[in-house]
């Protein structure tokens, strides 16, 4: 089993036989540095510059400066994190025992790397898309985008639930203008739905849950094995699990998912980065953080919460995939596909097994690169042809071969087939469900893969292999602008590279798993 | 000099009212500088006083050197020391922000307006600083009567609604006075600390109970605690925005302070929470106030009136928090007095700017304002987030303590009400933001292709507003310090 070997190699130490959890990291170092704060603020600080830039070219140049600076700051912390250190920075202690505080660990680093690297690509794509469609209010668009990235990195680096909540809410409010960018009645209706679901659940569920946690344990600091163990009755823990699992509605766990398809009225780059990567991944990341850092795997196992989490995730995966089958609007299809794929991550963590968790965490990255490519393709098609429905895309492969080839490879990654990075995460999820002795989950994953293939492959097939008279397009290659095509080729390539060279992601995922085994 | 801060705080604005009146006859241009100077002295004194309390503990100041219970004693501890800094600061910021409004709306009445303005602040500061229950009534009347006058200067309907407020307010003050009378009958004293030391042997007395009820009801009328709020929406809506943005942030908050002072000092927590079995029902009343305020606000299509109902709900927060009968609830209530004063100031200053520019405050007047007045609306968003309770704005942290107190007290009705109100606030404020952000201005109903020019309020109105908005965030980040250095000492150790 080669992947087992890769896994072992990356871990650099033998997996203990009985539990499957690797041995704990011994001497972990804590470094105090302002870098996490800077990484968060760099895109916040750029907004006045963006607002005052007179020329679009200057504005976009600044966006790139901020995006690259952000990525560089995040990447500069990577070596320390890979060495098993953590980087902390406290801003202010606002409530006794709870501060606005950043802590960079492997899980946060993983997500921050994915989000900040994709911001660079998306910035390029945004230029192509927004100028290609001559969208209005481009300055505001780039500002809110930068703010959203600040919030996403803030969530990634949060050291406690309060800080996470702060940036989670910030993300909700700064993405609202992006979702409603088109300003028409439909956009506003979707914006209302978006706020209602996202803010409604965070205030209605997460806020009280946070207070209960604080009153139980006196802290909100994420711990290796959470901080709730032994603090309250089982019924209270069940309540908290429900509140925190569904409270982060950005994770789009059913039945709190329907904001996501509605939010697809946004411009495609917004859908791409925010609704395939930043916003929804922030939701899932929060769920993962809460499950591991607030409850802790030991507590979840001892209370036998795993079946409930798995059930919720499985239902979301299957129902999401089935609904995706019936969609004609390409972006809506992708939205439902996203809903299903997000629950893979929840499922991976819910398995409470080392391999399952590795798979779940890997999927944060693998799905991000695959899904963003698909959204980029949908946007490129809209820019080049103005078409949004799948039924109007018959024969489009001849018109836009590069885009549709990228679409094909990215959908392979989502389905979980080589050479897409998604294969690895799905493989580990399968291994994890066997390890956890959850055979129904294996079936769910396989069925979901079939469904994924069933809704993606016909699009690709009809794009390339229709008869000439069926084709809805004239002959001749005419791709979208280069600013659209290059980013989607880049993300496709990364998706493939991640299949052959997953080591950086593996190392971080392994570190997360090691960190959890620390007790 | 510094030992006279408690007296300076009150007497300087009191005397300045006289000078402003004279200046109003002789040279109108002097009124504003005198008012600014007087309030600056008050602010400076209050800050000095707070510093002294932080280092030395509570300050007792005998007016004219007469010892209590015969003389009037000013007693300042961490509780009123904190709120004493808020009142002159809010009043001063509002004074500067509304200078242009006053000049435009009633140029002939500049003298009387500023005289009433500083007198009202005098009354509020006096209420805060005094340690004498009857003296408090006198100052309450000063604050109220000047308040009626200020609110009556406004639209055509302002005098009538202010008259309505006068009737209700007078009844409230009478109740309070009667309550103090009963206390005087049974204790023979008017000094709060003195009463407090005599009362424990009389806790079972019916007269004390009646005194307590009369004081509470009187104050509830004054603070517009639902269902005794009916005077407020009209009084605040039809008044000039210069007056509303002074009265709305301060009057109700100071009344909540008086209630907390009575709970903590005069009647002591033991009497309130142990002898009387009323804390549960009182918190339920607060739940009712919060829900009613939220629902009534939802029904409004008028920004200023909507905000007055938001105040009704906020008063419910504070009353409920104070009556939860535990440390976190009380901390939340006190913190919310400070936070809500600035939050309310922020949103009412926004209304002031909007009225100044577009001469209206109904929802249909707000269309397109995010484009023409981006800074004003930016401040509105910050104020809205704070009222909703989004970190790191200050509103989140007081809500945090209130919720925490409610959970500890096991009062889940209050928890639900607070969450409900937060959610309703999201709807309320984002409805306004949506209208001002998306609806195009003017008659053209097409897609807003034309981009209207910037039409912001003048700098003198904008700068104080933006300072308040930034202050909401700073206040949130410094919550830990405020709690640890001030409020921790304001809540008696007997509350846990």
Image (cartoon, rainbow, N blue to C red):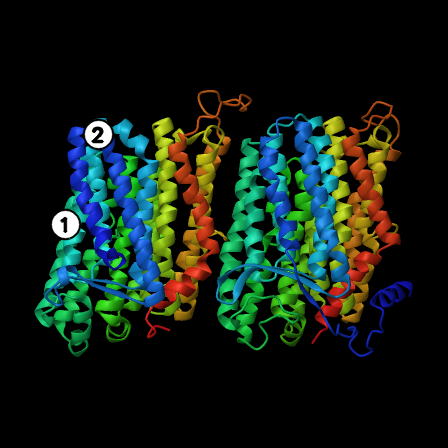
Q: Where, quadrant-wise, is the N terminus of chain B in this rendering?
A: bottom left
Q: Is residue B279 above or below residue B391?
A: below
Q: Is A494 displayed left or right of A110 in the figure?
A: right
Which residue is at a point 20% across and 44% down the rendered structure image? Answer: B119
User: Residue A398 at what x, y percent from top left?
Assistant: 86, 29
Ranked by sequence position, the earlier of labels 2 and 1 is 2
What residue would you read off at disc 2? B28
Which residue is at a point 40% across and 64% down the rendered structure image? Answer: B485
User: Residue B403 at what x, y percent from top left?
Assistant: 43, 62
What residue would you read off at disc 1? B170
Q: Is B327 displayed left or right of A274 in the figure?
A: left
User: Residue A508 at what x, y percent from top left?
Assistant: 77, 61
Q: Is residue A42 above or below residue A387?
A: below
Mark 2 and mark 1 residues within 8 Å of each other at the beta carbon? no
Q: Is B412 displayed left or right of A203 in the figure?
A: left
Residue B277 is tagged as none
Whether residue A252 appears in this view of the structure is: no
Label 1 marks a residue whose chain is: B
Judging depth in this view, the residue of B495 and B132 nearest the camera is B132
Q: Is residue A511 above or below residue A154?
A: below
The picture quadrant where one finds residue A55 is top right
Judging depth in this view, the residue of A512 and B71 nearest the camera is B71
Name the mark nearer the viewer: 2 or 1: 2
Distance between mark 2 and mark 1 Cα atoms:
32 Å
The picture quadrant where one finds residue A142 is top right
The picture quadrant where one finds residue A63 is top right
Other residues around mark 2 within 10 Å, as few (<14) / some (14–19) / many (≥20): some
Whether residue B181 appears in this view of the structure is: yes
User: Residue B266 at what x, y percent from top left?
Assistant: 21, 68
């Amino acid at each position: 089993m080669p992947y087992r070997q890769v896994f072992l190699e990356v871990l650099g130490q033998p997996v203990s036989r009985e539990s499957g959890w690797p041995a704990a990291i011994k001497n972990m170092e804590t470094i105090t540095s302002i870098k996490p704060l800077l990484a968060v603020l760099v895109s916040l600080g750029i907004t006045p510059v963006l607002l005052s830039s007179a020329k679009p070219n200057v504005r976009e140049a600044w966006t790139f400066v901020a995006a690259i600076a952000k990525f560089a700051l995040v990447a500069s912390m990577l070596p320390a994190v890979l060495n098993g250190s953590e980087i902390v920075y406290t801003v202010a202690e606002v409530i006794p025992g709870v501060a606005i505080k950043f802590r960079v660990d492997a899980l946060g680093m993983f997500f921050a790397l994915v989000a900040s690297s994709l911001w660079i690509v998306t910035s390029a794509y945004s230029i192509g898309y927004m100028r290609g469609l001559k969208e209005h209010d481009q300055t505001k668009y780039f500002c809110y985008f930068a703010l959203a990235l600040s919030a996403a990195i803030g969530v990634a680096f949060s050291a406690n639930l309060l800080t996470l909540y702060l940036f989670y809410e910030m993300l909700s409010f700064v993405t609202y203008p992006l979702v409603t960018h088109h300003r028409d009645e439909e956009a506003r209706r979707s914006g209302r739905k978006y706020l209602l679901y996202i803010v409604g659940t965070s205030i209605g569920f997460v806020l009280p849950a946070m207070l209960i946690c604080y009153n139980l344990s006196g802290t909100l600091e994420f711990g290796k094995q959470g901080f709730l163990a032994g603090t309250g009755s089982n019924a209270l823990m069940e309540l908290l699990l429900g509140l925190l699992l569904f409270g982060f509605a950005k994770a789009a766990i059913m039945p709190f998912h329907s904001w996501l398809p509605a939010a697809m009225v946004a411009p495609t780059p917004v859908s791409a980065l925010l609704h395939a990567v930043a916003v929804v991944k922030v939701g899932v990341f929060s769920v993962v953080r809460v499950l591991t850092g607030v409850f802790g795997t030991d507590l979840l196992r001892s209370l036998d919460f795993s079946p409930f989490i798995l059930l919720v995730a499985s239902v979301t995966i299957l129902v999401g995939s089935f609904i995706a089958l019936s969609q004609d609007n390409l972006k809506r299809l992708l939205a439902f596909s996203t809903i299903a794929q997000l629950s893979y991550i929840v499922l991976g963590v819910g398995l409470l097994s080392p391999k399952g968790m590795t798979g779940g965490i890997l999927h944060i990255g693998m799905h991000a690169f695959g899904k963003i490519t698909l959204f980029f393709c949908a946007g490129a098609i809209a820019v080049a042809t103005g078409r949004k429905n799948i039924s109007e895309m018959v024969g489009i492969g001849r018109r836009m071969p590069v885009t549709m080839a990228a679409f094909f490879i990215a959908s392979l990654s989502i389905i979980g087939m080589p050479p897409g990075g998604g294969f690895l995460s799905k493989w580990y999820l399968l291994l994890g469900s066997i390890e956890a002795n959850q055979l129904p989950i294996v079936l769910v994953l396989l069925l979901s893969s079939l469904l994924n293939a069933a809704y993606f492959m016909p699009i690709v097939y009809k794009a390339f292999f229709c008869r000439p008279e069926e084709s809805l397009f004239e002959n001749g290659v005419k791709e979208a602008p280069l600013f659209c095509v290059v980013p989607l080729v880049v993300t496709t390539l990364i998706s493939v590279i991640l299949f052959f060279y997953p080591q950086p992601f593996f190392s971080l995922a392994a570190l997360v798993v090691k960190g959890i085994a620390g007790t | 000099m510094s030992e006279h801060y408690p007296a300076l705080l009150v007497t300087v604005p009191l005397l300045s009212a006289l000078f402003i009146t004279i200046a109003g006859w002789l040279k109108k241009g002097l009124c504003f500088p005198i008012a600014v100077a007087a309030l600056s002295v008050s602010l400076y004194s209050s800050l000095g006083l707070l510093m002294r309390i932080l280092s030395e503990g509570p300050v007792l100041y005998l007016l004219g050197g007469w010892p209590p219970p015969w003389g009037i004693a000013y007693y300042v501890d961490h509780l009123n020391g904190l709120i004493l800094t808020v009142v002159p600061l809010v009043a001063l910021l509002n004074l500067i922000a509304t200078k242009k409004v006053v000049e435009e709306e009633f140029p002939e009445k500049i003298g009387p307006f500023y005289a009433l303005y500083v007198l009202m602040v005098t009354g509020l500061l006096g209420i805060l600083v005094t340690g004498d229950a009857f003296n408090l009534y006198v100052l309450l009347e000063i604050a109220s009567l000047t308040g009626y006058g200020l609110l009556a200067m406004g639209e055509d309907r302002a005098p009538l609604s202010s008259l309505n407020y006068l009737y209700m307010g007078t009844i409230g003050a009478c109740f309070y006075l009667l309550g103090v009378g009963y206390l005087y009958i049974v204790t023979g004293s008017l000094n709060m600390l003195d009463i407090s030391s005599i009362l424990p042997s009389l806790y079972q007395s019916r007269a004390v109970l009646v005194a307590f009820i009369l004081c509470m009801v009187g104050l509830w009328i004054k603070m517009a605690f639902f269902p005794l709020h009916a005077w407020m929406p009209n009084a605040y809506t039809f008044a000039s925005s210069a007056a509303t943005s002074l009265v709305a942030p301060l009057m109700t908050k100071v009344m909540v302070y008086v209630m907390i002072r009575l709970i903590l000092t005069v009647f002591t927590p033991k009497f309130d929470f142990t002898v009387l079995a009323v804390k549960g029902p009182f918190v339920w009343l607060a739940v009712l106030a919060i829900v009613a305020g939220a629902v009534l606000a939802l029904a409004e299509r008028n920004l200023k009136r909507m905000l007055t109902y938001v105040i009704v709900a906020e008063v419910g927060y504070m009353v409920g928090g104070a009556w939860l009968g535990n440390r976190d609830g009380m901390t939340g209530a006190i913190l919310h007095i400070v936070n809500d004063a600035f939050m309310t100031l922020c949103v009412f200053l926004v209304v002031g700017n909007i009225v100044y520019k577009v001469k209206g405050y109904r929802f249909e007047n707000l269309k397109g304002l995010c484009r023409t007045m981006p800074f004003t609306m930016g401040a509105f968003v910050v104020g809205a987030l704070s009222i909703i309770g989004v970190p790191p704005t200050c509103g989140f942290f007081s809500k945090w303590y209130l919720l925490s107190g409610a959970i500890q007290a096991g009062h889940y009705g209050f928890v639900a009400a607070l969450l409900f109100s937060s959610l309703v606030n999201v709807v309320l404020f984002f409805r306004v933001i949506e209208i001002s952000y998306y609806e195009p201005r003017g008659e053209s109903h097409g897609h807003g292709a034309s981009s209207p020019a910037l039409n912001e309020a003048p700098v003198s109105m904008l700068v104080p507003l933006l300072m308040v908005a930034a202050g909401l965030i700073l206040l949130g980040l410094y919550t830990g310090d405020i709690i640890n250095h001030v409020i921790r000492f304001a809540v008696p150790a007997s509350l846990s």
